[in-house]
Image (tube, rainbow, N blue to C red):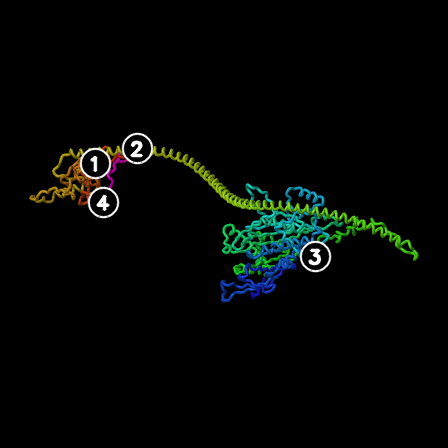
Amino acid sequence: MKPARAKTPRKPIVKKGSQTKDPVGVYCRVRPLSFHDQECCIEVINNATVQLHTPEGYRLNRNGDYKETQYSFKQVFGTHTTQKELFDVVAHPLVDDLIHGKNGLLFTYGVTGSGKTHTMTGSPGEGGLLPRCLDMIFNSIGSFQAKRYVFKSNDRNSMDIQCEVDALLERQKREAMPNPKTPSSKRQVDPEFADMITVKEFCKAEEVDEDSVYGVFVSYIEIYNNYIYDLLEEVPFDPIKPKPPQSKLLREDKNHNMYVAGCTEVEVKSTDEAFEVFWRGQKKRRIANTHLNRESSRSHSVFNIKLVQAPLDADGDNVLQEKEQITISQLSLVDLAGSERTNRTRAEGNRLREAGNINQSLMTLRTCMDVLRENQMYGTNKMVPYRDSKLTHLFKNYFDGEGKVRMIVCVNPKAEDYEESLQVMRFAEVTQEVEVARPIDKVICGLTPGRRYRNQPRGPVGDEPLVTDVVLQSFPPLPSCEILDINDEQTLPRLIEALEKRHLLRQIMIDEFNKQSNTFKALLQEFDNAVLSKENYMQGKLNEKEKMISGQKLEIERLEKKNKTLEYKIEILEKTTTIYEEDKRNLQQELETQNQKLQRQFSDKRRLEARLQGMVTETTMKWEKECERRVAAKQLEMQNKLWVKDEKLKQLKAIVTEPKIEKPERPSRERDREKVTLRSVSPSPVPNAPPIRLRHRRSRSAGDRWVDHKPASNVQTETVMQPHVPHAITVSVANEKALAKCEKYMLTHQELASDGEIETKLIKGDVYKTRGGGQSVQFTDIETLKQESPNGSRKRRSSTVAPAQPDGAESEWTDVETRCSVAVEMRAGSQLGPGYQHHAQPKRKKP
């Protein structure tokens, strides 16, 4: 479709090949408004152009004016167009091509409520394109149809031929079935669609091949949510658990044509049978009530009419039993679901999902048209995305040159559909520019034409005599009426006598006829009376039956409603069961996974326990050996300490028992002896000098009552500053009794400094009572007393030679300070016998 406004010039068209191509025929049909006072946005300009104008309330274009756009079609059908006029222009050429062995595709496109289904199917009293196509087909091939089951469809999108005997056996077999699937021509037409298939206009194709036989097969499918379903498939009814319909798959035959695998194909012999099959599938089609349409189609429906043609043999009596000579042509009538916007239809749940799938498939169809047009106009070779949708994948052969393609764009002129109608017009514009290759005519066979009627008799044979002939033969024969002499007086009297006899016989026959006629009239009157009484009786019975039927219909409606309710509940329960089963499977899988995980963890735990057991055993043995070694070392250390303490006691004992000298000096080293000598040469001190008094250092906390804890092992120092605490209780071992009487506590602790001198520490603390009635000491302060030599000489050697030590040492510490501050330990491996080592750890000297 090409708009009337100017366009940007395109590149020159690149044509490939020499095969003739025809553009897709796009037609437009405008349906009448539902109400006369509705606003209209579409106007028919002429028989090929429509104009869209923006309705009131819609946005304006950039210039501020209303946007008016014209679109051109192959032909436009206004609101007053009849179905017959539409059929003659659009569908009649497709049916004519079908009868001559060519394929065709006709589909209706438009928004919801634009009249697509009405155009395709029709309404009571005005049949649509589908019943008119069927009527034209059977009007054209009615006397040339093959007997039923001569043609037999297979699952490979082709046909097989059976001989007359096999076809007769199969007919008898099918007629013996209790519920035959194939409709019978003797069955009465369903009054529900009887008005739709009553076509007053007789239509027939021209130049039908009389030397061939034909068979018509129909199938009906729908594409719902991008799944293909067979609407003619007979599913066994199961009241307990009805089975949902199974979707079908698309296959490609040996000629690379797409078809629906396993689709039901029904052979029909008349328009009534074909439309009955269509109506049976139409009842299964999915429709729903939306905000825009009370019976909106929720799926794309495809009604296929397959015409099979096979030539007669040379005698013109039987079908030629050669499968290669069969010609199969197909006409697909597609009723597309309406494109719609969900914000207008107010769709929710399943309706929303259906609308999404419908719009997606139509968008794929538009994309395919765009790519086809681009490839044809610009010479590109882009891949057409037929496989993105089942709709386009099914009809890809038509766009590749397997037949004619026609599209009827149905539009609703009301203002509410303006934006949707605009999108439909744009799609039609693209579609009209796509070209499809023209199919090549097929030659059936090279047999002599006219063989059907060549061996048939020319005139009627063995006709029965008429009643008038029998009556005339019963009359007496007339004598010869030839007069040869003027004086002949016998011929005329004989003729008169014969005529009188005939007249008399005729009068007798008339009288007899009148008598019999009167008798027959009387009998007929009696019969009429009897029939009238029977009719009255039957009418009464019929009224009763109608009442009964009306009651049964109400009961059936109630049961149907109940059945629908139960079906809905069953569907919900099935979905719930499916969800529960899925959850159960997931939980079982999770349980199995957890069990496997627990088994792995249990195995790892057992391996870890065995490993830890080994490690524990190994560690136990290791620590047992280490404990034994440490115990031995500790025993040795304790022995050394005991020996050191013994040595200290011996030294203390020696100090205590050693005689006192006048002047306690420590001539322990050579330097000290030299100093003593020099000091003796110096003048003596002033004789009147007062004696030096020992000064006692007063404690900084001498106000409270103290516990003076002086261990018995402490050594008395010769320092001037001595700790003195008044009112103190001196103890050698701290006890509870002393602590209970005092508030303060002081511990006198002595240790060996880093320079070898004795360092005295006064550790002070506060005494607190505990809840249990006892006492506890919290240490708060430490005072340090230390003695140092001014010239840096800390130790002196004794002037006397000490006796040799048991371990072979040459000398020993002889002064009191050294012997009190130095302790030795015996250790294995020492050069001094058992070994010597300082007992107190050296500390860093404070500045």
Residue bearing the label numbered 3: 206
- Look at discs 4 and 1 and give the one toward the viewer: 1
Q: CA distance from mark 1 to mark 3?
A: 133 Å
Label whose residue precedes the other's in the sequence (2 or 4): 2
Which is more toward the observer, 85 or 533?
533
- Circle 4 is placed at which residue position? 845
Numbered range of the magenta stretch: 830-846
Choose mark 3 or mark 2, whichever is in front. 3
Quickly name the residue at label 1.
773
Marks 2,4: beta carbons within 8 A: no
Residues at marks 3 and 4, CA–CA distance in whole angstroms: 134 Å
Residue 87 drawn at (x, y percent): 64, 57
Looking at numbered disc 2 in the image, what kind of residue is underneath it? Val
Mark yes or no: residue 531 visible.
Answer: yes
Relative to 433, say whether 327 is above or below. Answer: above
Number of dots carrying numbers: 4
Quadrant in the rendering for residue 840: top left
Q: Amino acid at mark 3?
A: Glu
Mark 2 and mark 1: Cα distance apart in space: 40 Å
The amino acid at mark 1 is Gly
Image location of residue 426, percent across then percent down: 56, 60
Give SS at disc 4: loop
Residue under numbered circle 2: 631
